[in-house]
Image (cartoon, helix red, strand yellow):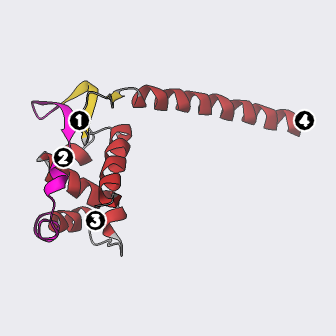
Amino acid sequence: MQFKGNEEKTKSAVIENAVSEQETEDATTDVALSSNAPEGVIRFKTPYVFEGNTISELDLRGLKGLSYSAIQKQMMPLYEMLSEGDYSSVPETTNEFIIAAAVYATKLPVEFFISENGLRFCHFFKMRTLIRNFLLQEV
């Protein structure tokens, strides 16, 4: 009898996992990283409408001009506000730092990246990967 109950739980878990995988697949196919997109640009198949503005891409090429001074003067105050005192010994690995870098590069308001009506989770991960790769690239 106990085996049958566990079997039902296993079936339920498999179904939930399949639904979750489908939702993830649907979400990730909404972002276009085509070969015609310039390096450092994430294009969306379905543009965002945020505060009356249509956002069809994230242009992160502004990171190329990033200097240490810009990090200290512009990004760190935003990072500190976003992290709410929960500081990391390696801030560039945190999501708050990634958001601060995206705000710096794109000139979009921070609310686009942190509000419920803003950037979707799957797009955030693509953006985070692109920014981290930029930070780790060889000079």
Three-letter code, disc 1? Pro
> Which residue appears at 33% of the width and 57% of the height?
137
Three-letter code, disc 2? Arg
> Which residue appears at 18% of the width and 46% of the height?
61
Could you give the CA–CA distance between mark 3 and mark 4, rounded to whole angstroms?
50 Å
Q: Which of marks 2 and 1 is nearer the N terminus?
A: 1
Image disc number at residue 102: none
Which of label 3 and label 2 is nearer to you? 2
Image disc number at residue 38: 1
Quickly name the residue at label 4: 1
Whether pointer 2 and pointer 1 mark residues with C-beta atoms closer than 8 Å, the reply is yes
Quickly name the residue at label 3: 83
Assign a secondary structure to mark 1. Answer: loop
Which of label 4 and label 2 is nearer to you? 2
Assign a secondary structure to mark 4. Answer: loop
In which quarter of the view is residue 66 placed?
A: bottom left
Quickly name the residue at label 2: 61
Three-letter code, disc 4? Met
- Which of the two residues, 128 or 34, is positioned nearer the viewer here? 34
Could you give the CA–CA distance between mark 1 and mark 4, rounded to whole angstroms?
59 Å
> Which residue appears at 21% of the width and 57% of the height?
100
Could you give the CA–CA distance between mark 3 and mark 1, rounded to whole angstroms?
31 Å
The local crowd at label 3, few if under 14, some if 14 to 19, many if 20 or more residues have their Cα within 10 Å, is: some
Whether pointer 3 and pointer 2 mark residues with C-beta atoms closer than 8 Å, the reply is no
Could you give the CA–CA distance between mark 4 and mark 2, rounded to whole angstroms?
60 Å
Q: Position of residue 139 (x, y in %)?
A: 28, 61
Assign a secondary structure to mark 3. Answer: helix
